[in-house]
Image: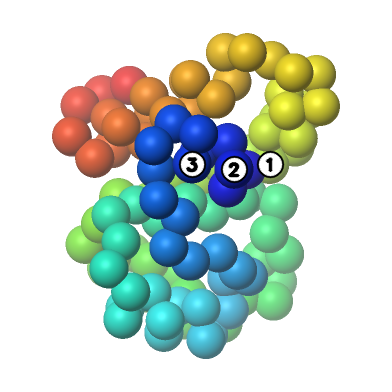
Amino acid sequence: MCRLLESYGFEIVCAGPLNEQFLGDLELIEHEVLLIDEDADFSTLPPNAAERLSHWHRPVLFNDSMITRASLQQGDPEFGRLLAEQIGALLTGDDA
């Protein structure tokens, strides 16, 4: 997914599991959008993860990684463009 987004001009500054260290690192890293895969094991999230994300001051996009995988495996030419448009809309505040 990182390479796909980079091909649309996005810079991936950090990627990893949504754990306490990652959440702490996000506060130190300069970024514009947080992309969370929905198939993450939410039972292993830090107890305060939902609260921390609810107070986030930047856009958060929840991504269905099963759809992502299927689209990439099938070579869906529209998938990357549509995802890039969604992220772009978050950055500009437009509805996608």
The residue under the point 57% across, 13% down is 78
Question: Which residue is under mark 3?
Answer: 6
The residue under label 2 is which amino acid type?
Arg
Q: Secondary structure at mark 2?
A: helix
For the residue carrying disc 2, how many other residues have a C-alpha within 10 Å: few (<14), some (14-19), or many (20+)?
few
For the residue carrying disc 3, how many other residues have a C-alpha within 10 Å: few (<14), some (14-19), or many (20+)?
few
Q: Is residue 64 visible?
A: yes
- Up/down of 44 relative to 72, above or below: below
2 and 1 marks in contact (CB < 8 Å)? no
Question: Which residue is under mark 1?
Answer: 65
The residue under label 3 is which amino acid type?
Glu
The residue under the point 20% across, 26% down is 94
CA gap between label 2 and label 3 equals 5 Å
Residue 3 numbered mark, or none: 2
Q: How is the image coloured?
A: rainbow
CA gap between label 3 and label 1 equals 17 Å
Tell me which label, 3 or 1, sits earlier in the chain.
3
- Up/down of 44 relative to 70, above or below: below
2 and 3 marks in contact (CB < 8 Å)? yes
The residue under the point 38% across, 24% down is 85
Q: Nearer the viewer, residue 81 or 53?
A: 81
24 sits to left or right of 42: left
Q: Position of residue 14 (x, y in %)?
A: 48, 66
- Up/down of 91 relative to 94, above or below: below
The residue under label 1 is which amino acid type?
Ser
